[in-house]
Image: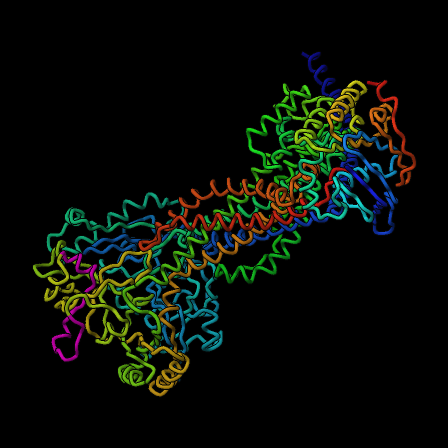
Amino acid sequence: METLQVYKKKEFMHQSMLNLFQYQNQSELNRFQCQKTLIMFKNHIKIAWRSLKRQPFFAFLNTFGLAIGMAGGLLISLYIYDEMNFDTMFKDADRIYRINADIKFGGTESKSAQVSAPMAAAMESDFSQVELTTRFRNLGGMLLRKSNTEANIKEEGATFVDATFFEMFGLDLLVGDMQTALKEPNTLVLTRTAALKHFGLKKAIGQSLVLNNTDTYTVTGVIEDMPERSFLRNHNVFMAMAGNEDAQKQEWTSHNFFTFIKLIPGADIADFQTPLQSMLGTYIMPYVQTFLPGATEEQLEASGNYLYYGTIALKDIHLYSAKDHELSPNSSIQNVYILSFIGLFLILLASVNFMNLSTAQSLKRAKEVGIRKTLGSDKPALIRQFLTESGLISFISLLFSLGIAVVAIPYFNALSGKSISIPFTEPVFWMALFIGATVLALFSGMYPAFFMSRFAPVKVLKGAGATSTGGGNIRSLLVVFQFAISVFLIVSTLVVFMQLKFIQSKDLGFTKDQVLIVDDVYTLGEKATAFKEQVEQLGQVQSATLSSFLPTPSVRSNTSFFKEGGATAENSINMQIWNVDDNYIPTLNMEILEGRNFDRQFGTDSTAMLINESAVAILGVQAKEALGMRIIRNFENGSSNNFTIIGVIKNFNYESLRENIGAVSMTLGRSTGSLAVKLEAGNFSNSISSIEGIWNKVAPGQPFSYRFMEDSFNTTYEAEQQLGRIFVTFTILSILIACLGLFGLAAFNAQKRTKEIGIRKVLGASIGQITYRLTTDFLKMVGVAIIVSLPVGWYLMNKWLEDFTYRIEISWWVFAFAALIALTIAVLTVSYQSIKAAIVNPVKSLRT
Amino acid sequence: MIQIQNLNKSFRTEEVETLALNNVNLKVQEGEFVAIMGPSGCGKSTLLNIIGMLDNPTSGSYQFAGHEVGHLKENQRTQLRKGNLGFVFQSFNLIDELTVFENVELPLIYLKMNKNERKQKVMAVLERMKIAHREKHFPQQLSGGQQQRVAISRAVVTNPKLILADEPTGNLDSKNGIEVMNLLTELNQEGTTIVMVTHSDRDSHYAHRIVNLFDGQIATESHNRAMGALM
């Protein structure tokens, strides 16, 4: 036993000594290796730099192409980072969800981001997983003035909000007490910007503000401006929900409240779906039975109606939520995907260029490789050398790309509607750049490095390498790849623009041209009609109509009606109800298919109703038969209204062309949100100043705000226009990169075929024949690229168009045109090099 | 067939002007076999290029078959070359990407001959040069002698009046060199005029006449009487 222990001890000592000895040797070895590597690296860099200097043309093509690709990739990465990080700044953002409702009732479907007012309280009391709820009742823009002044200031983004707002989103008040700030009715909290605009930061507390010339509110707090990357951006006024009447009502079928819940830590939202849906049985059906006696969930389902509750994570709202009337306009994950692909394409294109041009230069490098190998360089050492070169080019390109990005970022922001800046002060940014450039250098440099280090010294030194370095097929494949992407992008650009043009020129069922909209007319109160009448007197004005409801983005109101015969689910019709005046139809040039417009001569027209074709379809009758039918309004607050249909309006697109045209009804009523003025053709600025003159006389001190209906219409398609612009820009960039590659390759090809061109010329080939031959070789590649990319373009763009109810069909000429553009660009790029090669005297070519 | 008078050719680089040919006068009769010899840089290849209408002289006159061709434009020279002239080079100058058949067919394509006729002619010449069995091979798959036979096939496939050979045996071993020279002699005996640049004394003896160039000028001209002895 003792012997064994002694042995083990000795063994241990021996091992330790050995380790120590090895360690000392290893350390020296490491130091030596390190020095050797450093010297080699320096040597590689020196040679790489000389090699670049020796071939400035190729170095330029390589660097420039890569820099453009990197700059594009960088800008797109910043865009995507921005898009993917919405609402992440809020505390507990991971536990916050919004409740949605998908509803079909009375023939109308809606996907609502809002639910009923009593939902929040019910969830908080019934479900233990719910820690907190906060509701928003969005009001949009409103006029604010200090109580002691007359002049109003328009403030965008006003909303009622529950007092839990601060706790829910982890917001601190700059001034004021969080516990009491929004507890009392008629109190509000301003953002820093709004507070500074009206009072100053510190002075704001306790001040009074009159909203829309009606209600007086007291400022009880000031918060920091809402972050740009949040669903509350552009919201500046937060009013206490306690003062909102609707918020206190137990109306389970009006969906007007954005409702956010915060789950307790550890709770899983997936477990919440069933309890959430059970609220239909617990609360909604009993409420429905109060006006539809005997209604059951089964009946609701059997009649094709539904109400599905769902949730969406706060952080997903920006990219994944496309509900009706969101708090702020959202983007879509589809756009992120499209841009990611474009960014990836750009970098790939640039990388492919790099590979192509580097292997193309192998003619010149073959001899060098041969000599190096003869002198003892092994393959890994050569690979390291070539990778160092690609690394050097990659990092030089990176510097250029940063320059390009700095210059391009204002344009990119205008293009994408963002306000992105390059985070130069962030270490993470530099780290990402470094890693990106290294990966790109390795990715782009690996193939050329392996390709060139493979040359056999015997062959290349004999001169065989000069014409047969190979790799031609891969280079052709890479060119095909580049052009396939370019052709795909050309097709996509054409389709996006054609769809936009289609939207702009489609017969919408109303005329949006020459219509000026004056907003906030309600602030004139009783004087609104006088204002309208005076405007109508102007010579430049054809007609004018007062209404809050316009067929471009505007106020909407959806209400349930019933056909005569009883309040049953079968008889229900869900329709927009728009209060308009008798000038509405002629001013917007809408067409009455059957019946007549409202007429002041008829006293009974106060209960008359116009409906559109979609509403007629829900009624299940022909347009003619609809005339005279009576429609009963929902029994809200116990009151009911009966309407008689007096006319049927031709369907008009009042939502985006992505949507079907829903049912709309119009009744005569006083709704003074906006005045739509149809102007005579001519000088609009004169007309506007005349109208503004009248406004200032009628309502001194009220801000005059106007817009053209056409512009308002166009904002609906801002996303598509943005996409179109992005496509154009990146298509041009990708074509530019592809052309750089093709240009370099054509130069290389001409160089490689110098001898062949000479022989052909000696044998009687003309310049034209040589040029044709050199050019057609490339055109064949572009031809293959076209064949590959067109079906892909057709498939993907049809997928994109599926989002539109009203869309174009992609006709054959789009593909023909895209092919023609690609071929023309390729011919122009290649023919310069081809002609240059073809006119060389064969004596010279054969001498080389 | 060829009449050259007071022909000069100079090359200008950025700094210096080099006179490659200096007042050269030369006549070549139809059916003649002329060897041009001289040390490296004496202007042999320059003269051959001008005779082959690959290059224009700087001054002087060059008449081919009675027509002044010394100052033709490139297109006109190309037209005249086609079918009239055949070239054989030291380094064969075959196109690596084309097969033996395609290489030989090339001048006929530029003459816009139809496919059947082309095939017939190419096969006939390949048979004659005893290389028909290699018609589908690529130049890299052939020996030097075989490659030069292909090059000669290509030179003669159009039945040119004149064959210009620039050191045709320079890259060949002696056996293949003799074979090539025998082929050229055969063609000459059938009536083709041959002008050949060579360094080789042995090859020069196949010619009827030897023109010696020195510093761009014709130094000596001699008629060859021992030719028959080598054959």
| Magenta highlight range | A596-620
User: Which residue occupies 70% across, 17% down?
Assistant: A8
| Viewer-closest of B131 and A431 | B131
Residue A232 image point, x, y percent: 42, 62
Using residue A755 as the reference point, say whether residue A642 is left or right of it: left
Q: Residue furthest left?
A: A565
The image quadrant that residue A649 belongs to is bottom left
User: Which residue occupies 30% across, 74% down?
Assistant: A673
Question: Is residue A261 at least partly visible in the picture?
Answer: no
Q: Residue furthest bottom?
A: A697
Residue B79 image point, x, y percent: 67, 42
User: Which residue occupies 85% across, 22% down?
Assistant: B227
Using residue B129 as the reference point, say whether residue B70 is left or right of it: right
Q: Quadrant of the C terminus of chain A?
A: top right
Residue B5 image point, x, y percent: 84, 44
Relative to A834, say whether A693 is above or below.
below
The image quadrant that residue A329 belongs to is bottom left
In the image, is residue A612 part of the stretch drawn in magenta?
A: yes
Relative to A476, say whether A299 is above or below.
below
| Viewer-closest of A407 and A242 | A407
| Viewer-closest of A120 and A513 | A513
Using residue A279 as the reference point, say whether residue A17 is left or right of it: right
Residue B117 image point, x, y percent: 57, 29
In the image, is residue A726 part of the stretch drawn in magenta?
A: no
Relative to A785, say whether A18 is above or below.
above
Q: Quadrant of the N terminus of chain A?
A: top right
Question: Is residue B140 at least partly visible in the picture?
Answer: yes
Number of numbered discs on residues: 0
Q: How is the image coloured?
A: rainbow
Relative to A548, say whether A86 is above or below.
above
